[in-house]
Image (spheres, helix red, strand yellow):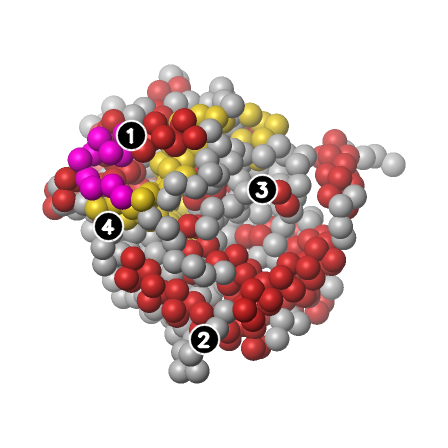
C-alpha cells in the first residue's frame, strides 16, 4: 500500500471510504498493521485494538453500503491517548501502578467518535499521569520515552507523546490528546503535526484521567487545521457527566469565517530556535492581510501559578497513590517527589494562585477585546534528546497563560530547525476555535510544512 | 541477571538526572520559588478565587 494513504487528510480518507474506493475494513487493517509494526519503534503504542476495530469496521461498511452516512470520520482509524477509558480494556494512564486498571465505561469523547463510525485502533502511550508531579525525564512513562519520528534519538514531547508521534508517522488518521498545560501543543510542535487545545469546558472529560480539574482539556491532534475542526465538531458538546462542561457545542463552519483582512493579530516576538524560521513564518502570517501588531503578555507569575495549581490538584487526585506508596513505582522519581510535596502546599498558596488566576482571566478578556488571536512560537526550542534532562527545556509563557485562562490554541508546523520540526501557535479568546482553525488553515494553504513526512 | 536494553537506558538517564539535584530537593526548590512569586503578588482584599472555573 502506498505511503500516501497513511498521510491523507480526513476529507481525503472520507472520500475514499464513501466512494468505496477502499472499505472501512481494508482501511482499518492497513492502519492497524502499520500501528502495530511501527508503533513500538516510537514507544507510541499502549494497546492495539485491532480485533475490536475490525468488528466495528464491518458494521461501518454495512452502513455505507446502505448509504447511512455519518459524517467525515466514518470508517477512519484513529488512536487515543491512554488517559481515556475504553470499557473493559486496560487504561494505564502511562503509569505502572495502573497497568492493570480497567473501567466499565467509555470516555464520552470516544463514545461520540464511535457513534460517527470512527474506528479506535489503538490506545497511545503517554507520560505517566500526564506528568502531574512534574517530570524531568523523557522516559517518564511505563512505555519508555516517546520517540520522535523525525529523529528517534529525540523526544516526541509530552504528555500526549504517542498521539504526536503516531500522527506524525502516519500510524493513525488522527488522534486524541489532552492538555493541562502544554500536553497537546508541545508534542504537536515537536512532531510536526497540528494540535488543537479547545476552550476549557468545550469537550467532555468524562472517562479521562483527572489531573488538574480546573485545567484539563481533551483535544485533537491531526495532519491539518481543517482535520482538527472536523474532529472537534464530533467530540465537543454538553455532557452532564462532566461538571465543568460548558454546555456548548462546536460546529466547524469555515463558510461563515471572517475575512482575514478583518482580523487583528498580536505577535510575541520572544526567543525562537532560529529567528529566521519564526520571521519567515511571520512573513507568511502578514501575507494573510490581517493587521499584525507586536504585543506583550500581561505581567503575571505564570509558571508559579500553573505549578501551584497543577501540583495541588494533581496531588489531591493522586493522594491514595501517594499514601499507598504506589507512587514509588513511577518511572521518574521527580513525579513521585512532586505528588508527595503537593500534599504539603499550604491552602493559602493554592487559594492565592486561584485568586490571581481570576485577575489573569480578566486581563486576557481585555487583551482579546482588541485582538482576535496572539501568534507566537509554540515552543522556543526543538525536541530535546531522549537522554537529556528536561530541566533546561525552555518554555513559552503563552502555554501556561492560555491554559490558566482556559483559552483555545492551535499549533501548526512552521518549519525546521536542525532538521527538527517547530510549530507556530495561534491562541484566541474563549470559543474562538473557528477563527483559530481558519488561521491555521490559511497558514497551511500558503505553506507545505504540514505535508512533510518523517523518514519512517 | 537479565537486564534489558530499556532498563540500561533508564538507569543511565536516571543517573544523569540524579547527578544534578535530588528529585525531592528540586521539587522543594520549585515550590519555594512558586510560593515566593505568589507572595510578591499583591491582591485587593475582595479578589475572589477562580474556583468554579468557567470561561
Q: Which residue is drawn at 27% across and 30% down?
A: A284
Of all residues, the one furthest to the right in this rendering is B1
Residue A11 appears in view: no
Residue sitting at 46 percent across and 23 percent down?
Answer: A454
Helix, strand or loop for disc 2:
loop
Q: Mark 1 points at which residue?
A: A283
Would you say B3 lies left or right of A451 here?
right
Mark 2 crowdedness (10 Å alpha carbons): few <14, some 14-19, many ≥20: some
Range of magenta residues:
A284-293
Q: Which of marks 2 and 3 is in front?
A: 2
Spatial CA span between label 1 and label 4: 18 Å
Q: How crowded is mark 3: few (under 14 residues within 10 Å), some or many (20 or more)?
A: some
* Residues tagged by mark 1 and mark 4 found on one chain of the structure: yes
Q: Hey, which residue is sitting farthest top in the picture?
A: A2
Q: In this view, does A36 lie above or below B29?
A: above
User: The N terminus of chain A is located in which quarter?
Assistant: top left
Answer yes or no: is residue A158 visible.
Answer: yes
- In the image, is residue B26 part of the stretch drawn in magenta? no
The kind of secondary structure element at disc 3 is loop
Considering only vertical position in the picture, is A347 above or below A445? below
Residue carrying label 2: B43
Relative placement, left or right, of A453 versus A21 is right
Q: Mark 3 points at which residue?
A: A393
Indicate the quadrant where residue A368 lies.
Answer: bottom left
Q: Sort mark 4 into few (<14), some (14-19) or many (20+) by Cα contacts within 10 Å.
A: many
Mark 3 or mark 4: name the one nearer the start of the chain: 4
Instruction: Give the percent coordinates (x, y) of residue A312.
Output: 57, 67
Q: Which of marks 1 and 4 is nearer the N terminus?
A: 1
Amino acid at each position: 500500500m502506498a505511503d500516501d494513504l497513511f498521510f491523507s487528510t480526513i476529507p481525503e480518507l472520507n472520500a475514499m471510504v464513501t466512494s468505496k474506493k477502499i472499505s472501512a475494513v481494508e482501511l482499518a487493517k492497513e492502519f492497524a498493521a502499520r500501528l502495530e509494526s511501527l508503533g513500538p519503534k516510537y514507544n507510541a503504542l499502549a494497546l492495539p485494538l485491532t480485533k475490536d476495530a475490525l468488528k466495528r469496521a464491518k458494521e461501518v461498511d454495512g452502513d455505507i453500503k446502505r448509504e447511512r452516512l455519518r459524517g467525515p470520520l466514518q470508517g477512519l482509524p484513529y488512536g487515543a491517548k491512554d488517559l481515556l477509558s475504553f470499557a473493559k480494556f486496560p487504561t494505564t494512564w502511562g503509569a505502572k501502578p495502573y497497568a492493570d486498571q480497567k473501567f466499565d465505561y467509555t470516555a464520552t469523547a470516544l463514545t461520540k467518535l464511535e457513534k460517527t463510525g470512527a474506528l479506535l485502533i489503538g490506545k497511545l502511550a503517554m507520560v505517566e499521569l500526564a506528568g502531574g508531579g512534574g517530570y524531568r525525564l523523557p522516559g517518564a512513562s511505563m512505555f519508555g520515552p516517546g520517540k520522535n519520528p523525525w529523529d528517534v534519538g529525540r523526544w516526541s514531547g509530552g504528555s500526549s507523546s504517542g498521539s504526536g508521534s503516531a500522527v506524525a508517522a502516519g500510524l493513525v488518521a488522527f488522534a486524541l490528546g489532552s492538555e493541562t498545560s502544554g500536553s497537546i501543543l508541545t508534542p504537536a510542535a515537536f512532531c510536526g503535526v497540528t494540535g488543537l487545545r479547545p476552550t476549557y469546558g468545550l469537550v467532555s472529560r468524562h472517562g479521562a484521567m483527572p489531573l488538574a480539574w480546573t485545567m484539563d482539556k481533551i483535544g485533537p491532534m491531526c495532519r491539518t487545521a481543517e482535520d482538527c475542526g472536523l474532529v472537534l465538531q464530533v467530540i465537543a458538546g454538553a455532557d452532564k457527566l462532566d461538571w465543568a462542561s460548558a454546555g456548548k457545542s462546536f460546529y466547524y463552519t469555515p463558510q461563515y469565517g471572517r475575512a482575514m483582512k478583518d482580523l487583528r493579530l498580536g505577535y510575541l516576538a520572544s526567543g525562537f530556535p532560529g529567528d529566521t524560521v519564526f520571521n519567515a513564518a511571520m512573513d507568511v502570517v502578514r501575507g494573510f492581510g490581517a493587521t499584525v501588531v507586536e504585543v506583550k503578555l500581561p505581567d503575571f507569575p505564570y509558571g508559579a501559578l500553573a505549578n501551584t495549581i497543577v501540583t495541588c490538584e494533581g496531588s489531591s487526585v493522586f493522594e491514595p497513590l501517594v499514601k499507598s506508596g504506589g507512587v514509588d513505582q513511577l518511572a521518574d522519581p521527580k513525579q513521585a517527589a512532586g505528588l508527595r510535596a503537593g500534599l504539603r502546599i499550604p491552602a493559602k498558596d493554592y487559594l492565592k494562585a486561584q485568586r490571581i488566576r481570576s485577575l489573569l482571566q480578566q486581563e486576557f478578556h481585555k487583551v482579546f477585546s482588541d485582538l482576535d488571536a496572539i501568534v507566537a512560537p509554540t515552543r522556543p526550542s526543538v525536541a530535546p534528546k531522549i537522554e537529556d534532562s528536561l530541566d533546561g527545556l525552555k518554555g513559552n509563557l503563552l502555554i501556561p497563560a492560555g491554559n490558566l485562562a482556559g483559552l483555545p490554541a492551535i499549533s501548526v508546523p512552521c518549519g525546521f530547525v536542525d532538521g527538527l520540526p517547530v510549530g507556530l501557535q495561534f491562541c484566541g479568546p474563549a470559543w474562538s476555535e473557528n477563527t483559530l482553525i481558519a488561521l491555521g488553515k490559511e497558514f497551511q494553504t500558503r505553506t507545505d510544512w504540514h505535508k512533510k513526512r518523517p523518514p519512517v | 541477571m537479565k537486564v534489558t536494553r530499556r532498563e540500561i537506558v533508564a538507569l543511565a538517564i536516571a543517573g544523569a538526572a540524579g547527578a544534578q539535584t535530588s528529585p525531592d530537593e528540586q521539587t522543594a526548590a520549585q515550590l519555594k520559588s512558586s510560593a515566593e512569586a505568589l507572595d510578591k503578588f499583591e491582591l485587593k482584599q475582595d479578589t475572589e478565587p477562580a474556583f468554579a472555573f468557567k470561561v
